[in-house]
């Protein structure tokens, strides 16, 4: 069913979807919506399958770039450059023709459209699947399955050449932990990390997640579509929303470090922050030194399928509370929402396409609620869907329904070494 048909109220597809929608929402109370926060209302709007959302209020900076016309035309979804106020800035390197776009409503929010070349996008997709989503980096699948050390993607690649190379993976045995809460899943409102409460964070129990009791044996090829995240750098404990510093830190790949530093160093932060009145706390004027002090040391690779979402949340597990968080978009496009310090603030919607980089920085932006309510179907750009290169074909087929987001942050100030149980962690 095409998106264009669903937007045409006279089409058979629209009328069929309308009947299904009316049937499934017949008993829904209208009072539910009155309790929604502004952020929740926006999430619901963009998540809706019927009627599909109109993106006229979504900032789509790709529409300013004629070189991206084929990318835009490849998918149905289209926002507007006029939807949200922005400030265009040249990059610090005068010979670089790319642009940066600051969003005045959220100081510290900077978008670098099409910052990554087509080849660099391919390189990072391959790195995400083949290099990062494997031992020693935990993934969501490791919780439930005893995975091969080379990772499910690399086994899948071999199996595509020779089906006999696929491996059947066994589920882990679920042994409930006495430290794990029982009953309905609870939202965790973790305390912001600082050097003052670091000892408390280190000493907080971090029990391993309990494997699923319903997981069945599965092949590596089948598990590839169930991959949702892979850890980068410092190990993140999802149950407490804190870093598990006792596990140490996996190396952050040089390629990723270079991309993140290049993005941060490309922005003229004087233009962003000079003359602003923001509460930086102990990190006042730190933005003046990000060219040297910014060192990415943690993060996550998110693997979204087209029906996946990311609920509104705030990142506050890093001691460097205002340092740049670099978010890289690869594959299908998405709607990204970012608001304020509470969910009551109406969020700004951005349409992020493959190769775009978003930088969240400073006290207003780093503590803002943000989320991804919609992966936009059928928006994979032509340079990623080409199957002429046989080595790229497995990646192109996987990316047809996938958005990869590489989300990188700085946990500690440069050269800071945490003391874990009296041992220096390097």
Image: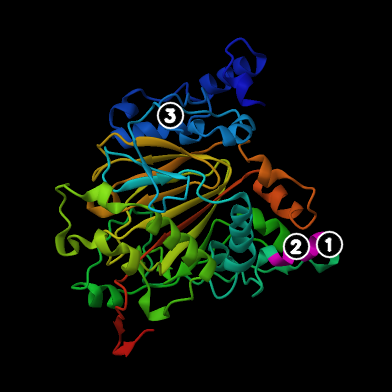
**Where is the C terminus found, in terms of image quarters?**
bottom left
Q: Are marks 1 and 2 in contact (CB under 8 Å)?
A: yes
User: Does the magenta portion include 156?
Assistant: yes
Q: Residue at x 34, y 58 (%)?
A: 324
**Residue 274 picture location, percent across and down:** 20, 50
Question: Alpha-carbon distance for marks 1 and 3?
Answer: 44 Å
Question: Closer to the camera, 43 or 25?
Answer: 43
Q: Position of residue 261 (x, y in %)?
A: 42, 62
From the viewer's perspective, tell me whether residue 393 is left or right of residue 67: right
For this view, does 175 lie left or right of residue 287? right
Front-most of residues 226 and 22: 226
Measure how far apart labels 3 and 2 are at the Cα level. Answer: 40 Å
Which label sits in the foreground, 1 or 3? Answer: 3
- The residue tagged 1 is 161
The quadrant in which residue 134 appears is: bottom right
Q: Residues within 10 Å of mark 2 (few under 14, many from 20)?
A: some
Side (left or right) of 139 relative to 94:
right
Tag shown at residue 81: 3
Q: Which residue is mark 2?
A: 157
Task: Look at the numbered disc 1 and give the secondary structure of its residue.
Answer: helix
**Whole-percent x, y for residue 376 in the image:** 55, 36
Q: Residue at x 15, y 53 (%)?
A: 279
Q: Earlier in the sequence, mark 3 or mark 2?
A: 3
Please tell me how crowded label 1 is: few (under 14), some (14-19), or many (20+) other residues with Cα within 10 Å: few
Q: Which sits in the foreground, 312 or 359? A: 359
Task: Using the image, tell me which numbered label, if any, was put on residue 393.
Answer: none
The answer to whether 29 is drawn above or below residue 125 in the figure is above
How much space separates mark 1 and mark 2, taking CA atoms? Answer: 7 Å
- The residue lying furthest to the front in this view is 95
């Amino acid at each position: 069913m095409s998106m264009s048909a669903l937007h045409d109220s006279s089409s058979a597809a629209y009328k069929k979807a309308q009947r299904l929608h009316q049937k499934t929402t017949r008993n829904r109370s209208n009072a539910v919506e009155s309790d929604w926060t502004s952020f929740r209302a926006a999430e619901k709007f963009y998540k809706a399958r019927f009627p599909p959302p109109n993106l006229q209020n979504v900032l789509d900076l790709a529409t300013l770039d004629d070189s991206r016309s084929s990318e835009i035309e490849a998918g149905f979804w289209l926002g507007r450059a006029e939807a949200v106020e922005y400030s265009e800035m040249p990059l610090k390197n005068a010979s670089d023709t790319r642009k940066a776009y600051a969003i005045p409503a959220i100081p510290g929010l900077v978008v670098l459209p099409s910052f990554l070349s087509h080849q660099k996008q391919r390189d990072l997709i391959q790195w995400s699947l083949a290099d990062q989503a494997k031992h020693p980096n935990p993934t969501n699948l490791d919780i439930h399955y005893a995975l091969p050390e080379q990772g499910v993607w690399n086994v899948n690649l071999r199996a595509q050449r020779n089906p006999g190379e696929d491996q059947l993976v066994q589920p882990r045995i679920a042994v409930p932990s006495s430290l794990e809460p029982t009953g309905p899943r609870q939202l965790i409102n973790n305390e912001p990390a600082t050097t003052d409460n670091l000892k408390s964070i280190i000493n907080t129990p971090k029990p391993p997640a309990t494997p699923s009791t319903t997981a069945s044996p599965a092949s590596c090829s089948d598990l590839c579509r169930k991959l949702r995240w892979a850890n980068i750098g410092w190990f993140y404990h999802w149950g407490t929303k804190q870093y598990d510093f006792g596990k140490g830190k996996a190396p952050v790949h040089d390629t990723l470090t270079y991309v993140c530093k290049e993005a941060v160093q490309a922005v003229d932060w004087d233009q962003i922050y000079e003359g602003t009145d923001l509460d930086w706390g102990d990190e006042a004027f730190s933005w003046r030194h990000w060219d040297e002090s910014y060192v990415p040391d943690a993060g996550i690779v998110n693997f979204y399928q087209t029906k996946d979402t990311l609920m509104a949340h705030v990142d506050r597990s890093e001691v460097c509370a205002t340092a740049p968080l670099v978010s890289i978009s690869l594959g299908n496009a998405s709607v990204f929402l970012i608001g304020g310090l509470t969910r009551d603030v109406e969020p700004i919607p951005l349409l992020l396409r493959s190769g775009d980089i978003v930088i969240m920085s400073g006290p207003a932006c780093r503590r803002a609620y943000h989320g991804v309510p919609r992966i936009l179907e059928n928006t994979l750009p032509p340079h990623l869907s080409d199957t002429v290169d046989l080595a790229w074909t497995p990646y192109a087929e996987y990316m047809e329904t996938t958005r990869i987001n590489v989300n990188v942050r700085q946990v500690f100030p440069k050269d800071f070494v945490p003391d874990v149980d009296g041992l220096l962690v390097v």
